[in-house]
Image: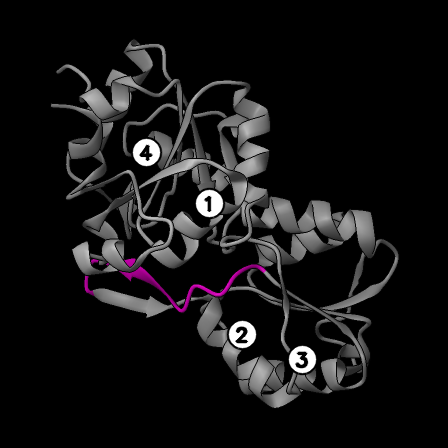
Amino acid sequence: MPLTPLAARYDQFILDLDGCVWVGHEPTPGVQEALQQLREAEKRVAFATNDPRAATEDYVARLWGIGVQASLRDVVTVGGALQHRLADTRQGRTAFVIGTPALKKHVADAGLRVLNGTDLASRAEVVIVAGTEDFVYEDLRNAGLAVRRGADFVATGRDPTYPQPDGFWPGTGAILAAVETVSERKAEIVGKPHPQLLLTALDRLGEGRTLVVGDRADADLAAAAGAGLDAALVKTGGQDEADAEAADPAPVAVAETLAALIVR
């Protein structure tokens, strides 16, 4: 299968995972063959995800599990970006974390002391919010109290949902909205739509004409614009032509799937 004229124009690609490479645990149609064609055409590929729930190793394993070869260097996660930011700016401080065990490990590895499960949780110096399926009222209370007491307030993103086979599930943004409501403060955002994830991927890929491919105009296209990169939108994450038309700047292309964007 030859590459599309659009794909042939670029030297390298930064691909979103949720809604672009897979939906839930299912690969999007034809994605394995499309990525293989990119490799055979000697195009460089990196993956950048705003999903904070798993470690980089887990995403690499999931890619191999659907038949896509990848290394740790190929995958840039918002958890890794958060760890880097915290290590640079908040090392040695205490933290209360709303997130998965993998996210809490990123925070601890950045040099912060995680206070979850202690009587001091509501007095943490930094509150970090990320997506998790284990969000409870006590988390909301502790986070709100700590932020109101002056804690730094950091989140991995504002994506309100993420796509699953049966529809859209609550994402980081849904949890963050609750914490921002109770604390009456806005969080500092580390992931997309800010461009740092893409800039990190770009550093790993090297120089070349780059196309970002994602499924959300408000996150992927905005981050690409901030990084000064071209971007394309695929519809497998639930967005459509109307979302693409409303985006500013507009994507260079809109396709039904990642495979349709890449191969003929």
- According to the picture, the residue beneath numbered tag 4 turns out to be 65
Q: Are marks 2 and 1 in contact (CB under 8 Å)?
A: no
Viewer-side label of 4, 2: 2
- Point out residue 247 in the picture as x, y percentages from the top left corner: 33, 56
The residue nearer to you, when weighing 102 against 153, is 153
Q: Position of residue 26 (x, y in %)?
A: 23, 45
Name the quadrant containing residue 93.
bottom right
Secondary structure at badge 3 equals: helix
Contact between labelled residues 3 and 4, with CB atoms less than 8 Å apart: no
- Give, as a three-letter code, the residue at label 1: Ala
Label 4, residues with CA under 10 Å away: few <14, some 14-19, many ≥20: few
Which residue is most to the right? Answer: 92
- Residue 28 falls left or right of residue 70: left
Residue at the image point whose x is 76% and y is 67% from the top: 95
- The alpha-carbon separation of the residues under discs 2 and 1 comes to 24 Å
- Is 4 a magenta residue? no
